[in-house]
Each structure stands twice: as C-alpha cells, then as structure tokens.
C-alpha cells in the first residue's frame, strides 16, 4: 500500500507545479494575451471559417500531456479566430461584451486562492467584498438599506432569480399559476419568457402590452390590461419593465409603471441589464426616476461595466423576500450557522459553491477608479447620437427613434427594390466584410439593422469606419440591383 501511495503521489504531484514551471506558463499566457490585445486593431470582428471551427476537434482530452505552446496556438486558431470577437472595438451587434484586463487578473487571483465565496463562515472577506459591491449597486439605484444583491453569472439568471423571488413573495401555489398574469412588452428580453418557463409558471398568462411610438410600454394600456384581468378573476402578479431594451435601447416609463404596480400590488421588476450602469453618467440621472420603487432590478456588469462575460447582478429591495426564496440549511452546513452576521451568497441564490466573482469586478473598479467608467459610458451615448445624426444626413436612410441609450436602428430605402430584402443583403455584406459586426432585428414586420455601442474599445474612429462601410456596401448593392 505504501509503495502504491508513493507511486500515486509522484504522479499526482504533477497537479501542483513548482514556481519555475508556473513562471514559464505565466510568461506564455502573458505573451498570448499581449498578442491578442495588441493585434485587435487588425483582426476581423467577425470571421466565418468552417475549417477553423472544425479544428476544435483536435483539442479533445488525451491520456498524455500536451505542451502549453501547442494549446495556446490551437486556442488562437480554433477558438479566437472563428465567429464573433466580443473584445473587438468593431463589435456593435447585440448588446456587446467587453473584457477589462484587470478582470482577467481578478479571475486569476480568485482561481489561485479559490476562496469559498458562497458562505460567510468560510470566506468572510470574500463574502463581505461581494456584499459591499452589491451594496454599491443598491446605492447607485437609490435602494434603501433593506435591499440586498447577489452577483449572478449573467442577466438571464438575475431575471430568473427575480421571478422566483416574486412567486415566493406572493406565495403563489401551483393551483394559482393558471390564473397568474405577467405583464411585459414585445420588446422585453427573451430571458424573461425563459425564466417564466423555468420557474414553473408556463401556465401563467403573458400579457404583451402595446408600445408607444418610442417603442416603450404604453402605461394606459398596461393599466387597462390589469383592470380587465382583475375583472376576469385573474391574478395580476408581475410587471417587467425594461430599462433599455436590447433591440432599440428604449426605456419603459419606470415611474408611471412603478405607481401602477404599487396601486394594484404587483411585483415590479426592472430589467436594467443593458441600461442600468448608465446611472454613472450624471446627466442620465433623471431617466432613472422611480427605479428605486422596483421590487427587483437586474444589472449586468458584463455589459455596461465592460467586464468579461460571467457576471450579472440581481438586486432585491426587501432582503427578507430574497432570503425567503433561497435560504436553505442542511445538516452538514451546521458550522456555517455559527457566525451568521453577514448574509451569504448561498442564502440568496440557487448556488452553493461558486466562483468568487467579486474579485473580477472589484479589481478594475478600484484600479481605474470610477472616472474612466463614467467617461466611457458617456462616450458610448454620444457615439450613438453621432451615428444617428450622421446616418440621417445620408440620402435614403431612415432610422428608428432617437437613441435614449446607445442603440440605433437604421435601414436603407432603395428606390426600385424591396426594402426588407435590400437591408437583409446589406447586413450580410457588412458581416462578410467583418471589420464591424452589426446585427439586425424585425419590429412590426420591418427589417432593421442595429448598431449597439457598448464596447469600451469603441471610439469615434470605429463609428466613422462603420459609416464608410455602410456607404460602400449600399453603393455596391445598388449597382448590382440596377444591373439585374
Ligand atoms: C443581455 C440582456 C439580458 C440577458 O442577460 P445575459 O447576461 O445575456 O444572460 C436580459 N435583459 C436585457 C435587457 C439584456 O440586454
């Protein structure tokens, strides 16, 4: 047995490399990161390559070790150089990502130290750090001291946590589900519908409230729908308002919806996954009026705080309700009960063991201070305004509503061709060009191209380049359609 143990020890020690080995690996990874970041300027934002996509099959798990240099090369070829590059300044599709460098260092620190950040008893420092970060977000939204937050993996999970919390807070039971009504607009993020299903509420009614001309939820229509449902004996239960829709960046009228929710005693959720952190821009403050009346708010640091993917946030105004929905105590956790002076993430989320997410958020906020975040967010708002103004100056372009945040919808109106078809071809041409990545959407059967400015690396130069690319491709497509 001792001999076998010695043999096994010798092998398992490979899992704990010495400093020399670690230094070599660190140097390789740093070199990889530098190449990645330094060449972003010259790499395509979007690359379609079947060959490279397939080459990922070479990366399967084997009995023998592979040198790090090979693995990094394969990462570059098979992963980095295919599809969409969300770290690129040219990514203006969807609600883009980011990838602040200090967050990578934060992940490194969190992974090396591997603090057990789910439970206060085991990692009081880590839990206090995360609670301090969500406290900061609560203060930013104007929430009272009773509020609490949890760092989730993203906005979808944050929305799910909100719906489950509301379901528990209003003590809905299975027999109530088919009478329950959820109010949202057609422009709500699809993660809300997904969360409704996951939380067991598929039988509930989803009421899509009509939009006003700015594609915001119509408040009179909302109130009418609630009254009609009450009259039918249904249970109006949950309102989702978007603070910045993904499609158009529209902000639902938060204050008016809040007062309706209060009058009729519905749970009021604000999905501010995209728009929430624009609160850091001083002149945006007035748009947030009423948000503190929400029962819950979703924020997404991996969007408008520019973090790499993997960090969302749910804030709940009354901490008791979040605790009530998620708190659980197992016998093998009895030691954790002792020092329960601080709320633990495990008490307010579906997770137990979890990544110490606070580090990737705290490190960049502290290293940079808030000033450059405020500047970058104001810059994104202005860049969207600039694009909106410039594209409207061009012949035959129309736009959606003036951007409230940093999304602009536009389309080209050809004289002798079908506009939807033309714009479909236009976005395909832009995606094929690959220098800038845009996405499209359909609103009321009209095909629109969207520009979403959210990447911290996107500046005036990229917007000017985008305008050039659009002009070039419209000229090419117009020429083709007259030749046909
Ligand atoms: C992105 C987004 C979500 C979903 O968040 P994920 O982080 O992608 O899970 C939800 N709501 C809105 C408004 C969003 O923009």
Image (cartoon, rainbow, N blue to C red):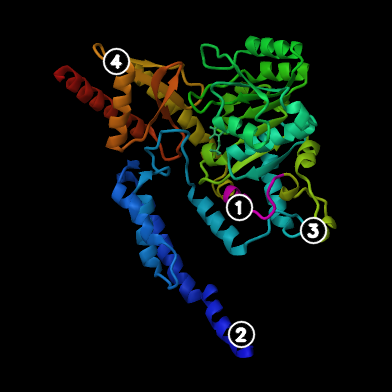
Task: Give the label on residue 418, or none.
Answer: 4
Q: Is mark 1 within 8 Å of ligand 1?
A: no
Q: Is residue 350 magenta?
A: yes
Mark count: 4
**Residue stretch rendered in magenta on the structure:** 349-362
Q: Please say if 263 is above or below 455.
A: above
Q: Which mark is nearer the camera, 1 or 2?
A: 2
Q: Of callouts 3 and 1, which one flags the residue occurring earlier in the amino acid sequence? A: 3
Q: Of callouts 2 and 4, which one flags the residue occurring earlier in the amino acid sequence? A: 2
Q: Secondary structure at mark 3?
A: helix
| Residue under the image location 74 percent in, 32 percent down | 167
Q: Quick check: 22 left or right of 89?
A: right
Task: Sort mark 4 into few (<14), some (14-19) or many (20+) by Cα contacts within 10 Å.
Answer: few
According to the picture, the residue beneath numbered tag 2 turns out to be 5
Residue 336 place in picture, x, y as percent? 80, 58
**Alpha carbons under labels 3 and 1: distance apart:** 25 Å
Q: Of callouts 4 and 3, which one flags the residue occurring earlier in the amino acid sequence? A: 3
Choose between 430 and 303: the one closer to the eye: 430
Q: Secondary structure at mark 4?
A: loop
According to the picture, the residue beneath numbered tag 3 turns out to be 333
**Alpha carbons under labels 4 and 3: distance apart:** 64 Å
**Alpha carbons under labels 4 and 1: distance apart:** 51 Å
**Alpha carbons under labels 3 and 2: distance apart:** 32 Å
Choose between 219 and 149: the one closer to the eye: 219
Residue 263 place in picture, x, y as percent? 77, 16
| Residue farthest left in this picture | 483
Q: Quadrant of residue 194?
A: top right
Residue 72 place in picture, x, y as percent? 38, 61
Res 139 seen here: no
Q: Of callouts 3 and 2, which one flags the residue occurring earlier in the amino acid sequence? A: 2
Q: Which mark is nearer the camera, 4 or 1?
A: 4
């Amino acid at each position: 047995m001792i001999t076998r143990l010695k043999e096994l020890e010798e092998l398992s020690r490979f899992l704990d490399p010495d400093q020399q080995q670690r230094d070599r690996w660190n140097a390789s990874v740093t070199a990889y990161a530098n190449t990645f970041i330094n060449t972003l300027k010259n790499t395509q934002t979007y690359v379609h390559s079947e060959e490279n996509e397939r080459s990922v099959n070479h990366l399967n798990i084997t009995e023998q070790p592979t040198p790090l240099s090979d693995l990094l090369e394969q990462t570059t070829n098979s992963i980095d150089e295919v599809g969409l590059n969300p770290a690129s300044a040219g990514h203006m599709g969807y609600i883009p990502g980011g990838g602040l460098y200090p967050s990578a260092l934060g992940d490194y620190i969190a992974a090396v130290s591997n603090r057990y950040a789910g439970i206060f008893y085991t990692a009081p420092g880590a839990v206090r750090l995360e609670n301090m970060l969500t406290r900061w977000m609560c203060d930013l939204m104007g929430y009272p001291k009773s509020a609490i937050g949890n760092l989730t993996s993203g906005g979808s999970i944050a929305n799910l946590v909100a719906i489950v919390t509301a379901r528990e807070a209003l003590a809905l039971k299975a027999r109530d589900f088919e009478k329950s009504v959820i109010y949202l607009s057609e422009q709500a993020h699809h993660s809300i519908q997904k969360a409704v299903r996951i939380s067991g509420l598929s039988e509930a009614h989803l009421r899509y409230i009509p939009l006003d001309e700015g594609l915001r939820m119509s408040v009179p229509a909302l109130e009418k729908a609630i009254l009609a449902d009450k009259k039918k004996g249904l249970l109006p239960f949950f309102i989702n308002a978007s603070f910045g829709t993904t499609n158009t960046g529209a902000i639902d009228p938060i204050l008016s919806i809040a007062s309706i929710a209060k009058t009729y005693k519905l749970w009021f959720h604000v999905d501010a996954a995209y728009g929430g952190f624009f609160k850091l821009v001083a002149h945006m403050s007035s748009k947030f009026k009423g948000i503190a009346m929400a029962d819950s708010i979703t924020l997404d640091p991996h969007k408008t705080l520019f973090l790499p993917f993997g960090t969302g946030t749910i804030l709940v105004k009354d901490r008791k309700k979040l605790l009530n929905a998620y708190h659980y105590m197992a016998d093998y956790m009895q030691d954790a009960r002792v020092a329960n002076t601080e709320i633990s993430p495990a008490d307010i989320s579906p997770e137990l063991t979890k990544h110490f997410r606070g580090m990737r958020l705290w490190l960049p906020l502290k290293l940079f201070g808030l000033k450059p975040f405020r500047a970058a967010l104001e810059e994104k708002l202005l860049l969207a305004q600039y694009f909106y103004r410039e594209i409207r100056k061009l012949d035959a372009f129309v736009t959606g509503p003036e951007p409230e945040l940093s999304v602009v919808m536009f389309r080209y109106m050809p004289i002798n061709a079908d506009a939807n078809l033309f714009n479909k071809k236009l976005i395909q041409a832009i995606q094929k060009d690959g220098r800038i990545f845009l996405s499209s959407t359909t609103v009321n059967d009209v095909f629109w191209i969207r520009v979403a400015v959210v990447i911290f690396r996107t500046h005036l130069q990229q917007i000017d380049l985008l305008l050039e690319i659009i002009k070039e491709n419209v000229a090419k497509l117009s020429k083709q359609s007259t030749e046909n």
